[in-house]
Image (cartoon, grey):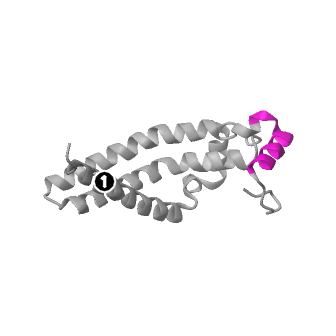
Amino acid sequence: MQSQTGVPLGPLRTARDLCARGGLPALFAGLGATIAREVPGTIIWFAAYDSAMRRLREWHTPRPLAVMGGGLTAGLAFTLSTLPLERIKTIQQASAGGAGGALAVATRVLRHEGVAGFYLGLLPVLARNLLIDVIQWSAADAIRQRAARLPA
């Protein structure tokens, strides 16, 4: 964590500074947007993986490649569907609660930056998410496959 001057701060000092500027609610700035992003985003993530995995297996794609394809699809679907809410949350958190509600922030972004404003930073976020999801789904599948071969 860093202060607005760029000086690293510990979590307790950061919490104290936030409360001093915006009261206790400043600690929860962006929480609503986080929940609004994570719940449907996770549903989309699992559904995209499952759908891609099923389709790739129907096409007789080898399981490791199907898992990687499912991971790529899950990461892409999650990122594209949730990045606008991530942008709203980031704006809210950066203002320590002074940016207003999610709808007000979204309206400002749309008015001043257009739809593209919701996708600032898409490429690095997408690259990170796709890499993580391929590794994560592949590791989970490898563990599941090995666990299935263990004696009962």
Residue 18 percent location from the top left of the image: 80, 44
Q: Is residue 8 above or below residue 50?
A: below
Q: For this view, does 98 lie left or right of residue 108?
A: right
Q: Which residue is mark 1?
A: 143
Q: Is residue 126 above or below residue 147?
A: below
Residue at x 77% of width, y 44% of height: 15
Q: Is residue 100 visible?
A: no
Q: Is residue 63 above or below residue 90?
A: below
20 drawn magenta = yes
Q: Is residue 149 above or below residue 33?
A: below
Q: Amino acid at mark 1?
A: Ile
Q: Quadrant of residue 35?
A: top right
Q: For this view, does 102 lie left or right of residue 8?
A: left
Question: How many marks on residues?
Answer: 1
SS under mark 1: helix
Considering the image in quadrants, where does the C terminus appear? top left
State whether the magenta stretch is mostly helix, strand or loop: helix
Residue range of the region highlighted in magenta in the rendering = 11-25
Residue at x 66% of width, y 43% of height: 105
